[in-house]
Amino acid sequence: MKRYLFHRLLLLLPTLFGALSLVFLLVHLIPGDPVEVMLGETASGADKQELRRALGLDQPLATQYRAFLTKLAAGDLGRSLFEQENVSAIIGQRLPATLELALCAMIAALFISFPLAFLAARRPGGIADRLALLFSLLGLSLPNFWMGPLLMILFSIQLGWTPVSGRGGFLHVILPALTLALGMAAILTRILRASLIQVARAEFVQAARAKGLSEKSVWFKHMLRNALLSVVTIMSLQFGALLAGSLITETVFSWPGIGRLTIQAIQTRDYPLVQGCVLVIAVAYVLVNFFTDIFYKLIDPRVSYGE
Amino acid sequence: MASKAWLRGGALILLLLLFAALGAPIIAPHDPLRQNLANDLVAFSADHPLGTDKLGRDILSRTLYGARISLLVGFATVAISLVIGLVIGSLAGYFGGWIDLLLMRLVDILLAFPGILLAIAFTAVLGPGLNHVVLALCLIGWTGYARLVRGEIIALREREFVQAARALGGRPRRVIFRHLLPNLLAPLAIQATFGLAAAIIAEGSLSFLGLGVEPPTPSWGSMLNDGRQFLLVAPHLTTYPGLAIMISVFALNLVGDGLQDRFQGRSL
């Protein structure tokens, strides 16, 4: 296990470093002069030059890259060009909103997918199974930039049950969380259904039935536990999809999280802010995948990556 | 078999879609760009069965023309990604060693980002436009094919027929193209089908954020984005392009699932 961990860590470092460099390059290649955006086109050349120097934008790219890495090592993500605040502080303010949304979406996805998968797996090929399959296919086909407005029309505008957008109490989170949950629920339903059907054929399940255990106990104590392994993996792998989905969903519902912040920063060409947001998302994504691997290896020692 | 019926249903929808895209200039009742401000935000009329948008443009015509953009972006993205992924995956899988290590680290770095995030960042760098959207989607899209091809080739490399081909003096290119790739057709076709669905959604997302195809060219994503301001007064602006995306992606998922069942055994 130690050797495995060492191997995975060794692979993690170049990936993270490569991702950081890619973010830096991307952000500095974005066309459009942030100084011009900040001061307006009418500003004098001297003023622009002054600001450019103050921001370090007059330095060669290599020098800016070195400064970026040095600061990053100290946990400094720079200052936002417009909000006169540290990027890490802004991200820190927005992070709870995204985490709240992601968590609610995960819970919603579980509540949708578990009953569906159970119903489907009880009689593979039956009506419930077909409907569950249809649901998961539809769920995968509904883009969240359409699903969001649809829910908004129905529940906020027609029925008036939920607020149209923004963050506040529990009512605010329902629609964005449902929008974000749909894709995940679709995938979870498929995976859990498949695992349950597979487990149902296993000898230990037949043995449990032969022993005279109640159907409830067979399903919950024996089958579900074994099927959960795949669910845990999929859920953590879906974390990336949640982050990606939050870019669109947060924009649709004006949800003040990292996703909307990223899009806004790109639109206003706030270099350091874009850089910080993309970095935080990428690092979170890489780390979650890393821990999923480790976790998977811990609970199932048969897993090998041939490395 | 239900899955066979689903596969056929999906394929039929796709054919209709293709027909709509190719035949748009003939089928569309109006010019998709023609404005008529006196006739804006109509929900339904004999002349405009799906209504008109804020500039009085016919939504049916725009939706039909939008199919061209979605399918064009989808096919171009899949084709280019497939070729790049095939080359890089074959090199990594066939030669192994440091070539493999290097190429797979590159894949890892690109996969360190949720796909759409990189696509958004790339289009922000490149500026909007059809070519840029395809380029941005390909920059990440190839990684999936590369991984698939590499994995399959590593599995096949040690098989007897491949070893025999090499022992007979077959050059790498010949062994890869004549002996290895034909075995990869089914998994690649399945991946490409799902890739097409993903590309259509990604194009929609980019256009929705205003980073996709430039106006006034009709695209499903940009129509949705335009209609968002009129959710209260004219929900039909978002309904039809949204439905179009959903139906296309649904059909592709049906076909992908059907192919998977057929070639790789029941996927459950």
Image (spheres, coloured by chain):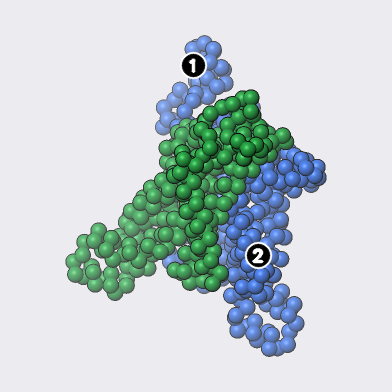
* Tint of chain B: green
Residue B47 horizontal/vertical position (percent) = 60, 36
Q: Helix, strand, or loop for circle 2?
A: helix
Residue type, label 1 = Gln
From the viewer's perspective, is the residue at label 2 or at label 1 nearer? 2
The residue tagged 1 is A49
Q: Are marks 2 and 1 in contact (CB under 8 Å)?
A: no
- Compared across the picture, whether A96 is left or right of A302 comes to right
Q: Quadrant of the C terminus of chain A?
A: bottom left
Residue in the image at 45% along x and 44% along y: B23
Q: Is residue A233 above or below residue A86?
A: below
Quick check: do tags 2 and 1 share a chain? yes
* Subunit that carries the residue with mark 1: A
Q: Nearer the viewer, residue A235 or A66?
A: A235
Residue in the image at 60% along x and 84% along y: A203
Q: Is residue A113 above or below residue A146?
A: below
Residue B228 horizontal/vertical position (percent) = 65, 36
* Tint of chain A: blue
The residue tagged 2 is A131
